[in-house]
Amino acid sequence: YMRTTEGPRRVDVIYRRIDDAWLDPLAFRADSMLGVPGLLSVYRAGGVVLANAIGTGVADDKSIYPYVPEMIRFYLGEQPILSNIP
C-alpha cells in the first residue's frame, strides 16, 4: 500500500527508477534513503510486480552492447533489425 492524502491505496505494479542496490534497505544497502524497506519481501511473496525486475539492469551496461545481436538470435530466434554502433 502507498500512503496518500486520502488514506492507503493498493499498489499492484511498480516501475522502479533506482539501481538494485538502493531498492530495499532491508535487503541490500542499509544506508539507502531511496528504497522502500520490505519491498523485496513483498515482491518475493507475489504482493507486487516490478515492471523492471531486479537484475535486469545488466542490459544497460555498455560492455554488453556488442553481444546484443547474438542474444537476439539466441533468445528470440530472429535477426536483429538495427545494427550496433561501432
Image (cartoon, grey):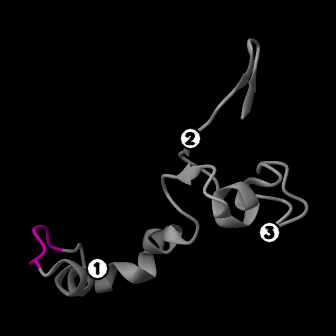
Q: Which residue lies furthest to the right in this view?
A: 31
Q: In this rendered view, identify the residue nearer to me: 59 or 47.
A: 47
Identify the disc placed on residue 68.
1
Instruction: Name the residue: 54% across, 52% down.
Output: 49
Residue 84: image location, x then y, percent:
21, 74
Mark 1 or 3: in front is: 3
Graded by Cα atoms within 10 Å as few (under 14), some (14 to 19) or many (20 or more), the crowding at tag 2 reads few
The residue at which mark 2 appears reads as 12
* Occupied quadrant, residue 28: bottom right
Q: Are marks 1 and 2 in contact (CB under 8 Å)?
A: no
Apparent side of residue 9 relative to residue 28 in the rendered image (left or right): left
Kind of residue indicated by mark 2: Asp
Query: Which corner quadrant holds the C terminus?
Result: bottom left
* First-in-chain label (1 vs 2): 2
Q: Could you tell me the amino acid type at mark 3? A: Phe
Between the C-alphas of marks 1 and 3, the distance is 29 Å
Q: Is residue 51 above or below residue 4?
A: below
- Indicate left or right for 18 with 32 as reference: left
Q: What stretch is highlighted in magenta?
A: 78-83
- Mark 1–mark 3 CB contact (< 8 Å): no
Residue under numbered circle 3: 28
Q: Residue 77 sits in which quadrant? A: bottom left
